[in-house]
Image (cartoon, coloured by chain):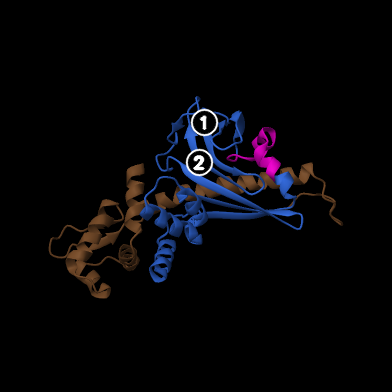
Amino acid sequence: MASQEQLDQVFGALADATRRAILARLVQGEATVNELVGPFDLKQPTISKHLKVLERAGLVSRGREAQFRPVRLNAAPLADAAKWIGSYRRLWEDSFDRLDALLESSQPTPKKGKQNGRKS
Amino acid sequence: MDASHKKATNSSFKIKRVFAAPLNRVWKAWSERDQFAKWWGPKGCSLEVSLLEFRAGGFFHYAMRSENAPAMWGRFNYREIVPHERIVWLNSFANEKCGIARAPFSDLCPLEIENSVAFAEQEGTTIMTLHAEPFGASAEEVKYFVELCSSGSLEQGYGGTLDQLADHLRQIARGS
C-alpha cells in the first residue's frame, strides 16, 4: 500500500497549482486529456506531463482506450496523506487536554462559583 | 542565516491553546521530567521516560507502553530552548538505544517532524502555539503540507468521501 515514497510523491504532485486544478476538475467526473486542456490555457503536452506526475503518485488513473483515455481521480493516496496529520493532531490535542487537567489539579486557582475544577 | 528559525515561524501544522496557569508553571510542565511524563504522549499509552535532557542538543527518550502490544520507543532531539519563550525539537520514533527509527506501525509518518512551541503569558494565562512540519522535506512537500494542514475538512479524520475531497480541492484550486 502506501509507502513513504508514495507519500512523498503525493506531496510533490499536489504542490503544483495546475495539478490541483486538474484534480478539482476530476472530482466532478472523469475527463479526457482534450477536455482537460480546454479550461487551463495550456498546451496538451504540458497537461500530459502533469497527468504523468499525478499518475505516478497514484492520484489519477487512466482508461485503456487509446483514443480517449479518460482520466479518473483516485482519492486513496490523498486520504493516506491526511491520515497521519490527523493522528498527529490528535496526539497533541489529547496531550494538551491532560496538561490542562494537570495544571488545574496542581494549582488551585480560585474560581468563584465553581466547585468542581473539571472542564467539560 | 538561520533556516530552521525561519521555517518554524511560517509553517504549517498549528495548534494554539490557552492554559489557565502562569507561564512559569507551564514551563515547568515541559522542562521537568516528572511533570512532562504526566501529560505528554498518545492516548491509551503509559509513558516511561528513560532520558530527559532538557537542553539544546539533548534528548528526551521514552517508551510508549500499552496493553497487549510491544513498547514503542520515541525521542525528542531538542534543538533550541529559550526559557519561557520557545522550544524547538525534532520528534521521531526510536529504538531502545535512542537511535532514530521509522514508525513501527506505518511508513506513513515522516522520519522526523520538526516541532516548535512558543509561549506567551497574558493576564495569568499562558498562550501556547505549536507548529510542526516534516523535517528535511523538500520545499514542495512542505508547501503541500501547509495546505493540507490548513484545510479543516482534511483534519477531521478524512473519511475518504469524495464530497469532502471535492470541497478541499475546490478550495485550494481557488486559493492559488
Of all chains, the one bearing label 1 is: B
Residue found 48% across the figure and 28% down from its top = B95
In the image shown, does A44 or B10 lie closer to the viewer?
B10
Q: Is residue B175 above or below residue A110?
A: below
Image quarter of residue B17: bottom right
Which chain is tinted blue?
A: B
Q: Are marks 2 and 1 in contact (CB under 8 Å)?
A: no
Q: Position of residue B128 (x, y in %)?
A: 64, 52
Q: Position of residue B171 (x, y in %)?
A: 43, 68
User: Which residues fall within the magenta stretch?
Assistant: B27-43
Image quarter of residue B165: bottom left
Q: Are marks 2 and 1 on the same chain?
A: yes
Mark 1 falls on what kind of element? strand
Q: Mark 1 belongs to which amino acid? A: Trp
Instruction: Specify the quadrant that holds the C terminus of chain B.
Output: bottom left
Residue found 41% across the figure and 50% down from its top = A81
Q: Which mark is residue B73?
A: 1
Q: Mark 2 belongs to which amino acid? A: Leu
Q: Position of residue B112 (x, y in %)?
A: 45, 41
Q: Which residue is mark 2?
A: B90
Is A118 displayed left or right of B94 in the figure?
A: right
